[in-house]
Image: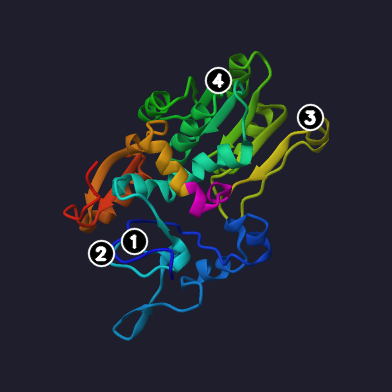
């Protein structure tokens, strides 16, 4: 390993890549054919684990397992970053922000003035909203049932809110001069949502599925309209990103004041409060929470 040295600050990517398989060679490292088997079995890229307790292997969650004071990660997961970026910002850039931002910028690529609809205003959805706003999209519509989350979306660049219990398709068309959204981002992944997203999207528009449904979930769209309206339906894993390039770019956007990643953090937790942090996340009580392992370490301060 030569790209980082002892004492460097790094962001950690849960999607390391080998650099030489067909997907990596095509510039799509998140589809690396070597990382998927290891990700699912809880090992490092070489198929091994580096932790043991009472003689038993302790597996690595998504290569990183960062709810710990120390960890072992693949070299490709360690991405050098400037030392002046606070670690809470770095932590979010390595997952939620890159996932939502990349779904918009890397996958959908809206033009200035395009209408964007985002389902869900959690950490990923809010990141997609920030990316749409930064791209010059207008309007930026969020579909979200929680008032606090909707308010956060408006503060981060959304221009309108629709509630899932109203006629979402009609509301979106009213906000887009009858056309529908040019880009629709599903950051929820609820079964049945794709059908509504298809109807809310304008002919020629793009629907990006980001939220992951249950493994057994299925979706369908009207086949004849799919052809006649030339809509694009695609998935986006980890923001369709190149983490080694895109994470430093996100941090430069933050440093320049163009991407307010820090405003996503609504709570911090000590390491022994991880259970509470997960409960708050599942209950929708935080935009994003950050677990502070050691607030005395240089880099935690904003």
- Point 44% across, 67% down: residue: 75
Residue 61 position within the rendered picture, expressed as x and y whole percent measured from the top left: 42, 65
Q: Nearer the viewer, residue 136 or 283?
A: 136
Could you tell whether 43 is left or right of 275 in the image? right
Please give the range of residues in magenta: 237-246
Q: Are marks 2 and 1 in contact (CB under 8 Å)?
A: no
Look at mark 1 in the image and give the residue it sits on: 66
Q: Report the Cα–Cα distance between label 3 and label 1.
A: 45 Å
Q: Report the Cα–Cα distance between label 3 and label 4.
A: 21 Å
- Point 27% across, 52% down: residue: 291
Look at mark 2 in the image and give the residue it sits on: 69
Q: Nearer the viewer, residue 83 or 281?
A: 83
Is 110 drawn above or below residue 15 in the view shown? above
Disc 1 crowd, CA 10 A, few/some/many (<14, 14-19, 20+): some
Residue 284 position within the rendered picture, expressed as x and y whole percent measured from the top left: 36, 40
Q: Determine the secondary structure under disc 4.
A: loop
- Point 71% across, 42% down: residue: 220
Look at mark 4 in the image and give the residue it sits on: 139
Q: Which of labels 3 and 1 is toward the front?
A: 1
């Amino acid at each position: 390993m030569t790209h980082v040295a002892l004492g460097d600050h790094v962001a950690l990517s849960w999607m390391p890549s080998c650099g030489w398989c067909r997907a990596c060679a095509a510039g799509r490292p998140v589809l690396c054919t070597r990382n998927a088997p290891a990700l699912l079995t809880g090992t490092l890229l070489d198929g091994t684990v580096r932790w043991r307790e009472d003689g038993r292997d302790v597996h690595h969650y998504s290569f990183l397992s960062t709810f710990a004071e120390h960890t072992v990660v693949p070299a490709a997961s360690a991405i050098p970053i400037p030392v002046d970026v606070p670690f809470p910002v770095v932590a979010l850039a390595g997952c939620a922000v890159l996932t939502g931002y990349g779904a918009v910028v890397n996958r959908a690529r809206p033009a200035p003035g395009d209408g964007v609809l985002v389902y869900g205003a959690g950490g990923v959805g809010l990141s997609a909203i920030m990316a749409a706003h930064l791209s010059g999209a207008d309007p930026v519509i969020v579909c979200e049932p929680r008032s606090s989350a909707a308010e956060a979306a408006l503060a981060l660049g959304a221009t309108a809110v629709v509630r899932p219990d109203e006629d979402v398709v009609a509301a979106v068309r009213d906000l887009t001069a009858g056309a529908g959204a040019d880009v629709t981002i599903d950051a929820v992944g609820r079964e049945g949502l794709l059908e509504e997203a298809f109807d809310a999207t304008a002919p020629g528009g793009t629907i990006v599925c980001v939220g992951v449904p249950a493994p057994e979930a299925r979706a369908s769209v009207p086949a004849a309209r799919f052809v006649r309206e030339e809509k694009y339906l695609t998935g986006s894993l980890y923001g369709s990103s190149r983490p080694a390039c895109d994470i430093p770019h996100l941090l430069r956007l933050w440093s320049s004041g163009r991407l307010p990643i820090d405003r996503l953090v609504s709570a911090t937790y000590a390491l022994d409060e991880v259970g509470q942090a997960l409960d708050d996340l599942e209950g929708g009580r935080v935009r994003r929470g950050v677990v502070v392992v050691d607030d005395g370490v240089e880099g935690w301060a904003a």
